[in-house]
Structure formats: structure tokens, C-alpha cells
Image (spheres, rainbow, N blue to C red):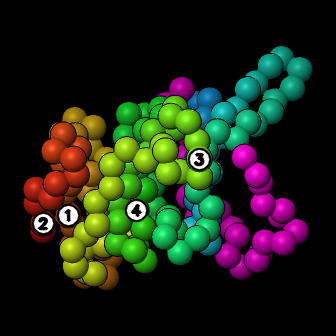
């Protein structure tokens, strides 16, 4: 996977917005203010530590990632794009081709105020919850029914 040159990044937008480890501690995921998402496998040996890029969604108009969360605590991740009002689910174990082949599910939220700026996964109920801080709305999407909307508060 090509990595962006850090010298060409905009210092105002390239700072990390969110960082998360999986439950096993061997993968790290991050999101920056530009909307790029990256996941790395961390290999720790007794002598050295290295990071291996395993998945990334770079900044473009269609897939600018606002927030993300892990679904199964290891390799399935859901992303929220506020600009295009979409929720996408990716499997990081599938072959990678700029996120297209790894995309498992996608849903476009119907109204602009439904698209939120935060997404959380409730593993017990198998739902994704998107929250909008401005309007105070929350939308629940069921993972078992292909991200069909089940509740709006």
C-alpha cells in the first residue's frame, strides 16, 4: 500500500483525530482530520517492533471518514462519512484494492441531519448507532438486516 509522504501533508488537517487498538493489542487504527483512515498490524519481537500497513482509506470526496468503530473487536470495521452521509462496513481480511473489494455493506442515510459525527457498535444487540451532536439525533442500524434502519431518536 502506498503511504503518503508526511512532508507533503497539511499540518492543520493531518493530525490524528481518533486512535484505537483492537482487543488483542496487535492492530492499531487511526483517523485524521483530512478523513483518511489507516490500520496497521504491529509485530513486537524481543529486539524490535515494526508496523505493517494492512488497510487504508485515503482522503477523497467519496470516502472521507468522519468516525470509525470496530464491530467484532478485531478485523471488521464500520466507518461513517458525514459529507456523503454513508455508513460503510469493511472486512480487513478480504483482498485490498483501495477499499472497494473489502467493502461488505453500505447504507446511505436519507436525511442530512441523520448523518452524524460519531458511530458506535453495540455488539450485544448487533446494531450500529450514529449520533449527530448538533441536532441531538441518534439512528440505529441493524447489522443482521443489512444495515436497515430500526430506530430513530
First-in-chain label (1 vs 3): 3
The C terminus: image quadrant? bottom left
| Local secondary structure at mark 1 | strand
Q: Secondary structure at mark 2?
A: strand
Of the numbered discs in the image, which one, if any, rests on residue 152? 2
Magenta highlight range: 1-24
Q: Which mark is residue 104?
A: none
Whether the magenta-drawn stretch holds residue 14 is answered as yes
Q: Is residue 7 above or below residue 92?
A: below
Q: Position of residue 5 (x, y in %)?
A: 84, 62
Question: What's the CA distance linking mark 1 and mark 3?
Answer: 30 Å
Discs 2/4, front: 4
User: Is 127 one of the magenta-colored residues?
Assistant: no
Instruction: Name the residue nearer the viewer: 42 or 5.
Output: 5
Q: Nearer the viewer, mark 3 or mark 2?
A: 3
Are there few (<14), some (14-19), or many (20+) residues within 10 Å of tag 2? few
Q: Are marks 1 and 2 in contact (CB under 8 Å)?
A: yes
Q: Quadrant of residue 106?
A: bottom left
Work out whether mark 3 precedes mark 2 in sequence or the reverse, and give the earlier one.
3
The answer to whether marks 4 and 1 mark residues whose Cβ atoms lie closer than 8 Å is no
Residue at the image point whose x is 80% and y is 33% from the top? 50
Dividing the picture into quadrants, the one containing residue 37 is bottom right
The answer to whether 145 appears left or right of 63 in the picture is left
The residue singled out by tag 3 in the image is 97
Residue ID for mark 1? 139
Tag 1–tag 3 contact (CB < 8 Å): no
Determine whether the residue tagged by mark 3 lies in a helix, strand or loop. Answer: loop
Give percent across and percent down for residue 17. 58, 64
Q: Which mark is residue 80?
A: 4
Q: Earlier in the sequence, mark 4 or mark 1?
A: 4
Distance from the alpha carbon under mark 4 to that under mark 3: 19 Å
Amino acid at each position: 500500500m502506498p503511504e503518503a509522504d508526511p512532508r507533503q501533508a497539511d499540518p492543520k488537517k493531518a493530525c490524528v483525530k481518533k486512535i484505537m487498538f483492537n482487543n488483542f493489542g496487535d492492530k492499531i487504527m487511526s483517523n485524521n482530520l483530512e478523513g483518511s483512515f489507516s490500520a496497521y498490524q504491529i509485530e513486537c519481537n524481543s529486539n524490535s517492533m515494526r508496523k505493517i500497513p494492512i488497510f487504508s482509506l485515503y482522503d477523497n470526496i467519496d470516502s472521507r471518514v468522519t468516525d470509525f468503530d470496530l464491530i467484532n473487536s478485531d478485523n471488521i470495521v464500520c466507518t461513517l462519512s458525514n459529507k456523503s452521509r454513508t455508513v460503510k462496513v469493511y472486512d480487513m481480511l478480504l483482498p485490498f484494492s483501495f477499499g472497494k473489494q473489502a467493502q461488505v455493506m453500505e447504507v446511505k442515510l436519507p436525511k442530512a441531519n441523520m448523518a452524524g459525527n460519531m458511530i458506535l457498535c453495540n455488539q450485544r444487540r448487533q446494531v450500529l448507532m450514529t449520533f449527530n451532536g448538533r441536532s441531538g439525533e441518534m439512528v440505529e442500524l441493524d447489522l443482521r438486516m443489512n444495515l436497515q434502519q430500526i430506530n430513530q431518536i
